[in-house]
């Protein structure tokens, strides 16, 4: 999952970026409101963590502009208009919390906060945005627990690399929808990270080998999907 972090405090931002990476998120870190708005106009994100007290353009204004965008086209800007936003606020800034929620924020967290709580709130927002009420994703005998970073197949644990887990997570969140190679790459890599050649294809191959061959379907010339109606139809892999 790819996250946009908008925070002007260098120490807090650095700690958040490190913590988010440890939780399995590819994180783009912007330090002012103008840079955040530019990123949101060009890059797709699963969620945004937004400080309100930003230089150049306030976090509240970034949020208002984000929610006011026209969502009729399918570019990154319009897709991001609907993504979940978690605002960071100071303990005594009750008015800012109210304004942020009224402007379209999905949740807020008061500074100082625990990294575990931040990660849990992120997971809940992303889960709600995907239309899933359960904290555990299920498809075709596969169970994925984002909180525990655990995958089970036919009730047996399956060891996946961080990138393999991220690919599976994205596909299961979008069960029934085709995700292109580019869309998967966008969720796997933050700015400045080198994209390995054929990385998505390699991760898909490993998922099919470690789980079962028919889990991820290839739609030739379009992308990959896990069918929404595959629950309970899995067959154990012979190798």
Image: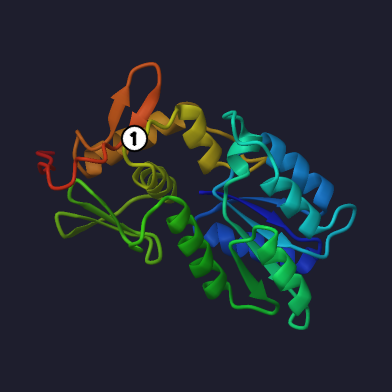
Q: Residues within 10 Å of mark 1 (few under 14, many from 20)?
A: many
- The quarter holding residue 163 reads top left
Residue 201, given in percent of the width and then of the height, sits at: 38, 29
Task: Give the secondary structure at mark 1.
Answer: helix
> Does residue 7 sit above or below 206 in this rendering?
below
Q: Is residue 170 left or right of residue 74?
A: left
Please identify the residue farthest to the bottom as the structure is shown: 92
Q: Which of the pair 42/149 is nearer the observer? A: 42
All told, the count of numbered labels is: 1
> Image quadrant for the C terminus?
top left
Q: Is residue 214 left or right of residue 106?
A: left
Q: Residue at x 13, y 47 (%)?
A: 232
Please identify the residue farthest to the right as the structure is shown: 56
Please identify the residue farthest to the top as the structure is shown: 221
Give the residue pinned by disc 1. 204
Residue 13, given in percent of the width and then of the height, sits at: 73, 63
Residue 29, given in percent of the width and then of the height, sits at: 71, 52
Residue 15, given in percent of the width and then of the height, sits at: 68, 67
Q: Is residue 88 left or right of residue 238?
A: right
Image color mode: rainbow
> Does residue 107 sit above or below 44 in this rendering?
below
Q: Residue at x 29, y 54 (%)?
A: 159
> Does residue 159 sit above or below 226 in this rendering?
below
Q: Residue at x 31, y 25 (%)?
A: 218
Q: Is residue 92 left or right of residue 69?
A: right
């Amino acid at each position: 999952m790819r996250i946009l972090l908008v925070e002007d405090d260098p120490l807090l931002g650095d700690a958040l970026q490190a913590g988010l990476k440890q939780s399995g998120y590819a994180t783009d870190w912007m330090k002012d409101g103008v840079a955040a708005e530019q990123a949101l106009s060009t890059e797709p994100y699963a969620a945004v963590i937004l400080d309100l007290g930003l230089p150049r353009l306030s976090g509240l204004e970034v949020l208002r502009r984000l929610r006011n965008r026209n969502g009729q086209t399918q570019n990154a800007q319009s897709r991001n208009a609907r993504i979940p936003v978690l605002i960071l606020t100071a303990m005594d800034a009750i008015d800012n919390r109210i304004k942020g929620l009224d402007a379209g924020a999905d949740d807020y967290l008061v500074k100082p906060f625990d990294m575990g709580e931040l990660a849990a709130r992120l997971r809940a927002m992303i889960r709600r945005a995907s239309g899933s009420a359960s904290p555990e994703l299920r498809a075709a005998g596969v169970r994925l627990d984002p909180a525990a970073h655990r995958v089970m197949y036919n009730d047996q644990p399956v060891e996946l690399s961080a990138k393999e887990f991220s690919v599976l997570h994205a596909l299961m969140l979008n069960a029934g929808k085709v995700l292109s190679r580019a869309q998967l790459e966008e969720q796997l890599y933050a700015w400045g990270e080198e994209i390995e050649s054929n990385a998505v294809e390699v991760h898909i191959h490993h998922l099919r080998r470690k789980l079962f061959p028919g889990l991820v379907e290839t739609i030739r010339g379009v992308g990959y999907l896990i069918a929404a109606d595959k629950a309970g139809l899995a067959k154990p892999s012979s190798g």
